[in-house]
Amino acid sequence: MPKATLTRRGRVVAAACVIGGLLALAAGGRALDAVVLPGIVALVAGYVQLARVEDPEVRRVPPPDGFVGERGEVRIELRPSTAGAAGTYLAAVADDTDEGLEGPETPIRASIGEGPVTYRVRYRKRGRRRLGPARVTATDVFGLFDREVVVDDADAVTAYPVCHPIPARFRRELYAADAVGVSRRREEFDRLREYARGDALRDVHWPTTAKRDEIVVKEFAAETRRGRVSIAGETTREREGADALASAAASLALAVLDDGVPVDLTLPAGSVSVRPGPQGRRAVLELAAVTGPGDVAVDDADVAVIADGDGARYRTGGRTVDVDELRASAADGESGGEPTPEAGGTPPEPGVGGR
């Protein structure tokens, strides 16, 4: 560690000792024991205590990756680097974070060697975000000296873009063409599944729904034998729209993956081909987290995501849909079209409740 330096309190005590010593000498030394010696003893004891302190070992446990707006806990384990060094000592710990994270504004007071130091961060901006290095400022028990060391150890956490729900009707239009050739009249029953927003009322399997606390719908072979959906995204301006692009592309890709459909995603930062499941979702989110502005080949994709400073748009099948309007329709329950169990509406069709 660097050499110990006097704190403000230490400078006051040192000045009091000097002035007290001069006054004591002028008075014949009678006040030396009462004023000066206790201060000198405290200064010497504080310096010796910090002289035995060595650079601490640091092990940081970063929080899990998360979405912008979420919070996570960082744990820092600090202990003496060698077995003979001072076992515990007081310190103020400040862990540097980049501008994409919001952490504590003041250092954390802790006793090094007794337990981990923890603090919470909020993910402010998407991307790979840095944690560290840590600044450890050790102080003696009197607060007269301190010694600061920068532990050059850093970790990273990924902040994913904010994702929003995508209406089921819009999603299924992307892969409906593959399903039509398999079962145009929806005659080939495949399985039962949990209701998803946008499912038609006529697909509800009422006997099973009555036995459960959730709505269950019938899924047909035409809805399960699907190919892939390709999504390509770009920005129309050099420096604007990257956040809107990342959010819109990730939202659609995750929604399609949740439907059980593989996805090919191409963004300015790269491309991934993923299948449904946790690994596929993570690959999509990691790509969207680090993508920046730029252009890619979008003409051959099933869905082109076009973004600028005003927002993002989906372009598919010769039409363009504003992403904000699509999200609003999802929040409103996808009004219009076939009735859904959420919206009420017409009674079930005859025979739907049977097998």
Image (cartoon, rainbow, N blue to C red):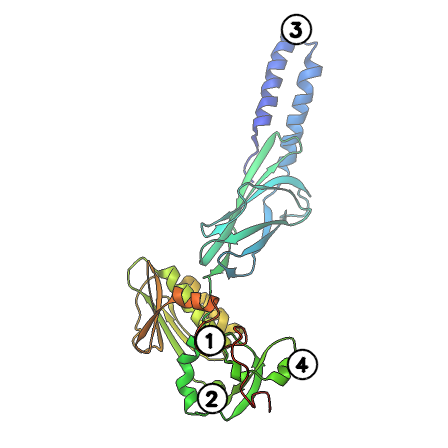
**Residue 168 shows which numbered tag?**
1
Q: Which-is-in-front pick, marks 2 and 3?
A: 2
Alpha carbons under labels 4 and 3: distance apart: 97 Å
Q: Is residue 216 above or below residue 22?
A: below
Give neighbour class at mark 3: few <14, some 14-19, many 20+ (Cα, 10 Å).
few
Are discs 1 and 2 less than 8 Å apart at CB? no
Alpha carbons under labels 4 and 1: distance apart: 25 Å
Q: Earlier in the sequence, mark 4 or mark 1?
A: 1
Give neighbour class at mark 2: few <14, some 14-19, many 20+ (Cα, 10 Å).
many
Q: Is residue 350 above or below residue 113?
A: below
Q: Please provide percent x and percent y for residue 353.
A: 59, 87
Seen at 58% across and 19% down, the residue is 15
Q: Earlier in the sequence, mark 2 or mark 4?
A: 4
Q: Is residue 211 visible?
A: yes
Q: Please name the residue that numbered disc 3 is placed on.
A: 27
340, 51: nearer the viewer:
340
Q: Please name the residue that numbered disc 4 is placed on.
A: 211
Q: Which-is-in-front pick, marks 1 and 3?
A: 1
Q: Please provide percent x and percent y for residue 154.
A: 51, 53
Seen at 29% across and 76% down, the residue is 299
